Amino acid sequence: MHRLMQVRKEPDSGLLITLFQFVFTCLSTLHYQFDPNGRYYMRSSPVPFRKWCVSAALFFTVNMMNNWAFAFDISVPVHIILRSFGSVTTMAAGWLRGKRYTPLQVFSVAILTAGVMVSAWADAQSKGKNMNTSTSDTSNSSLQAGLVILLVAQLLSAWMGAYVEDIYRDHGKDWQANLFYSHLLSIPFFAAFAPVLTSQFARLRASQSFEIPPKVGAALPPIINSLLASTSQHVIFLTANALTQLLCITGVNMLSANTSAVTVTIVLNIRKLPPSNLD
């Protein structure tokens, strides 16, 4: 959610935010796979390398499409509502891959999805957020393109969830390896966007330095104060965002290794409920 808000606020920085998150996660999880005696200093994995490549390609594509959608007049509430179909699409992907679900499971997912959609819509209305800012034919066309992008991303995400579930079933539930390789093998794809990333990074470095509140500064060592004062505030925010995303995606991977893809999307759907509706 936090990254959605950041990308919506500064859509031109979405690519850089995503790259930084991928690199940060990759470096933070390197110790899981590092082996000084292994080939390429990596711990051997029972999962065929090509399967990690497929998983990473799907992961990268889904992330890029979700970010890209914001360039087509897609508001955050609409984004959340469309992604609430995750349980439905994941169940459909599982069915196509041979899984079968009971009528009670299907009904439960349908009720949950409808509840999250209504809740997100009501929360947006109560806070005065626009669900649809389109006012012209051009804007409507842009919105429709964004909706198609989100729909395709949702379908790919569902297929990815089912694919990773099959990997865990066939080769063991090594969620640390999935977390590492899905990010590591995605990074080379960013090379195609090098000019855009260079421009975004230049703007990021040009932002004003981080301002430390006096009370906070008094409690910090001088060297930390000096480091923060000489660092762009956007770099600080970018790092904080990457850290929160690392915590989030680590939890998602741990959950996916211990339950089904449908259950994971159900938990993520519940997470989308506004806090006031969870009291």
Image: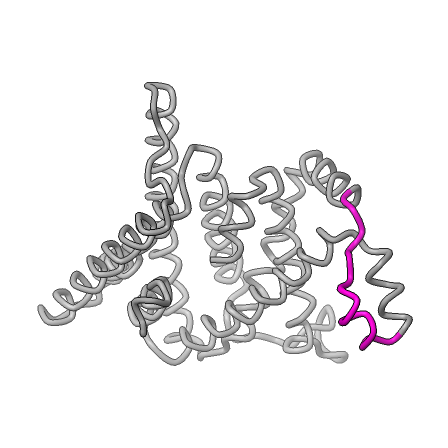
Is 219 in the magenta?
Answer: yes
Of the pair 204 and 179, the residue shown nearer to us: 204
For image coordinates 75% across by 80% down, the residue present is 37
Where is residue 177? Give x, y as percent: 56, 72
> In the rendered view of the protein, which quadrant contains the C terminus?
bottom left
Q: Is residue 95 left or right of residue 174?
A: left
Where is residue 214? Give x, y as percent: 79, 67
- What is the residue that sits farthest to the front in this orientation? 215
Query: Magenta region's main secondary structure?
Result: loop
Where is residue 106? Give x, y as percent: 14, 65
- What is the residue that sits farthest to the left in this orientation? 103
The residues colored magenta run 207-221
For image coordinates 48% across by 74% down, the residue present is 251
Of the pair 126 and 11, the residue shown nearer to us: 126
For image coordinates 90% across by 70% down, the residue present is 223
Relative height, residue 69 to residue 126 (above, below): above
Relative height, residue 245 to residue 65 (above, below): below
Of the pair 171 and 64, the residue shown nearer to us: 64
Relative height, residue 17 to residue 105 (above, below): above
- The answer to which image quadrant residue 240 occupies is bottom right
Relative height, residue 144 to residue 104 (above, below): above
